[in-house]
Amino acid sequence: MDKISNKETYLESISNRDLKIYLMGELVKDPLTHPIIKPSIEAMAETYDLAVKEPELATAKSPYTGEYINRFLHIAENNEDLFLQNKMQRKLGQLTGTCFQRCVGMDAFNALHSVTFEIDEKYKTNYHDNFIKFLTEMHKYNLVIGGAMTDVKGDRSKLPHEQEDEDLYLRIVDRNEKGVYVKGAKAHQTGCINSHWMVVMPTLRLSENDKDYAIVGAIPVDAEGITYIYGRQSCDTRSMEPGEYDVGNKYFAGQEAMVIFDNVFIPNEYIFMNGEYDYAAMLVERFTTYHRRSYVCKAGVGDVLIGAAATIAEYNGVENASHIKDKIVEMNKLNETIYATGIASSLQGSETKSGNYMNDDLLANVCKQHVTKETYEIGRLAQDLAGGLVGSMPSGVDFNEGEMSEDLKKYLKGKDDINAEDRVKILRLIENMTLGRNAVAYLTESMHGAGSPQAQRVQISRKVDIEQKKDFAKKLSGVKERD
């Protein structure tokens, strides 16, 4: 394989692979041409296109090969690297209006850089060397790495080894001198089909009885024993219908799939944790620290939705009304709050034992808490400004080809100088992002991605030094410490 250098060579690199993908009960012959899958591939391809158009933003020099690589593959070496990740993520959100699917992998291997180092430090293993060799290989070819953390979990009140069905968390089912075999499933895996490799990881704190679940390893996405079941999203079959008016986002979409592992082999050289259950919690916490501030991507997607809301207000002739202006101001305030807390987390990052940089944990969780709420309010305000047509507009077939086409073009107009066609396109985009297919990428991911909202509140509680705050208050008010 040659090094991937642009969008075209990326598309070539994922063509003609033997992936077992089920979508709506049928095996997909070619994901690159399937109308439901293709928009997600185009969104992933934008990460390569941006690297060509804005290399100072979307590329970095590899410390392992000395060549420039996509920034999504780069290990953060300082706070500036962490900040540039965020800036790139917002830009791609603006360009695609959806999930571009590479943040999980980037955050996973940044977390693994330090975790493998510290496991080796304690147990004298060679996971960090394995990891660096693997990452060097990825840099050499400029590949896409997906991260696979979320297990299907079964009964949430029970640990993995306590489940009635042992396969509800990914586990090692066999070992030999060359490696291990794993079985289980990972749920809602972002961009997995569009990746070259995936890194499987445990999803929660483990006990000593869960050693077989403490497995981290790299697997090619077309490895034997892997099956993908493509996730359904609201209005996704519109991509299979003639015309383009009902789709909303003409070019891009996100991707989520369930991945089933049936005795999939991981060679020793691609294993980065194997039974060290006491480091599972560290990995999860460090991954979520990176990933929760990565949700600044939603600020970029929010920019698109705010733009659509402002445009429909203009098309409706109400852009100068004071209450309309105020709602758009509110949308921008909420959107910039997401971005501000994310970059604050990155710019207050610190060096780990292994030498890479990790962003601030407390502020990352504050960022993600805002994401779980502000995106929904931005979506609500966009629907408010759009009006009732966002949920009741006639189909594109009626608009363009039906007997009532001319009547619809007459009655769906807004301002005199705006044609009905453009007004319909903007309304469909708002529908797509708040009710339709890309509402998953903007709203559902904002709620559940990188852990539940309560998980972030728990982490905020852990990281805030409340005793220090009490000391500030006591000192200024003259309260003396008691024995």
Image (tube, rainbow, N blue to C red):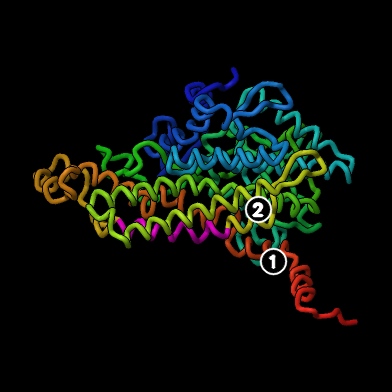
Q: Main secondary structure of the magenta part?
A: helix
C-alpha separation, residue under disc 1 versus residue under disc 2: 28 Å
Q: According to the image, label 2 marks what residue?
A: 169
Name the foreground residue: 144 vs 388: 388
Quadrant where the image shows the C terminus: bottom right
Q: Residues within 10 Å of mark 2 (few under 14, many from 20)?
A: many
Mark 2, secondary structure of its residue = loop
Residue 249: x and y, percent?
35, 42
Q: Is residue 431 magenta?
A: no
Residue bounds of the magenta highlight = 369-385
Q: Residue furthest top?
A: 2
> Mark 2 is on which residue type?
Tyr
Reading the chain from its start, which is encountered first: label 1 or label 2?
Answer: 2
Q: According to the image, label 1 marks what residue?
A: 461
Residue 221: x and y, percent?
59, 34
Against 388, is 353 above or below? Answer: above
Badge number at residue 166: none
> Mark 1 is on which residue type?
Ser
